[in-house]
Image (cartoon, rainbow, N blue to C red):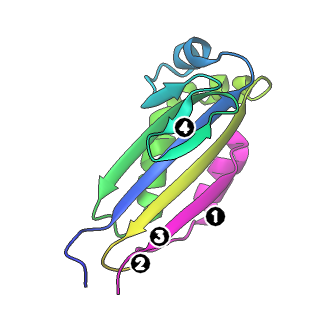
């Protein structure tokens, strides 16, 4: 068994063919974890270029046993700006991604009806990117 602990990230992606960083930051009153311009290299480990401008807000915790708890923390963080988030959807593409690096065991991956309703009311699709790295 790996000695590394599990790593879970919850990411809110907002992308657009047009520049969006300042408008999104102002509307949500949240500084992005990262933002990028169309044509920028996506990451140092891939050669792919960004196809659109982007804004990312990420919450990350190590040793998470329940991914829904971390997702709810992210939803609680953006809750004061929910109306602005919904308004921004007419101009930008948005999605939530939960990334799991399961180094020791698979944490619980599931959503309660309440959390699914919250995501649905915000019009946010969700995806799970899971890497089972333990033996």
Label 3 – label 4 distance at C-alpha: 20 Å
Q: Which mark is residue 17?
A: none
Residue underneath mark 2: 106
Mark 3 secondary-structure assignment: strand
Q: Is residue 18 above or below residue 69?
A: above
* Position in image of residue 34 (x %, y %): 45, 30
Q: Is residue 28 above or below residue 116?
A: above
On the question of residue 85 being in view, the answer is: yes
Label 3 – label 1 distance at C-alpha: 25 Å
Looking at the rendered image, the quarter that the N terminus falls into is: bottom left
The residue nearer to you, when weighing 4 against 74, is: 4
Give residue 124's quadrant in the image: top right
Pick whichever of labels 2 and 1 is earlier in the sequence: 2
* 45 in magenta: no
Residue underneath mark 1: 113
Neighbourhood count class around disc 2 (C-alpha, 10 Å): few under 14, some 14–19, many 20 upward:
some
Mark 1 secondary-structure assignment: helix
- Identity of the residue drawn at 54% across and 37% down: 42
Residues in magenta, as a range: 106-135
Label 2 – label 3 distance at C-alpha: 9 Å
Pick whichever of labels 4 and 1 is earlier in the sequence: 4
Neighbourhood count class around disc 1 (C-alpha, 10 Å): few under 14, some 14–19, many 20 upward:
few
Q: Which mark is residue 131?
A: 3
* Position in image of residue 74 (x %, y %): 46, 43
């Amino acid at each position: 068994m790996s000695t590394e602990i599990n790593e879970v990230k919850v990411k809110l992606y907002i992308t657009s063919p047009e520049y969006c960083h300042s408008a999104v930051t102002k509307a949500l009153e949240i500084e992005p974890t990262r933002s990028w311009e169309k044509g920028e290299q996506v990451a140092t480990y891939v050669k792919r270029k960004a196809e659109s401008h982007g804004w990312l807000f990420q919450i990350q915790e190590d040793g998470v046993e329940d991914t829904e708890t971390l997702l709810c923390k992210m939803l609680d963080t953006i809750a004061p700006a929910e109306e602005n988030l919904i308004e921004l959807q007419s101009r930008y593409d948005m999605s939530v991604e939960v990334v799991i690096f399961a180094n020791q065991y698979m944490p619980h991956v599931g959503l309660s009806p309440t959390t699914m309703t919250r995501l649905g009311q915000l019009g946010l699709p969700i995806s799970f990117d899971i890497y089972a790295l333990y033996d």
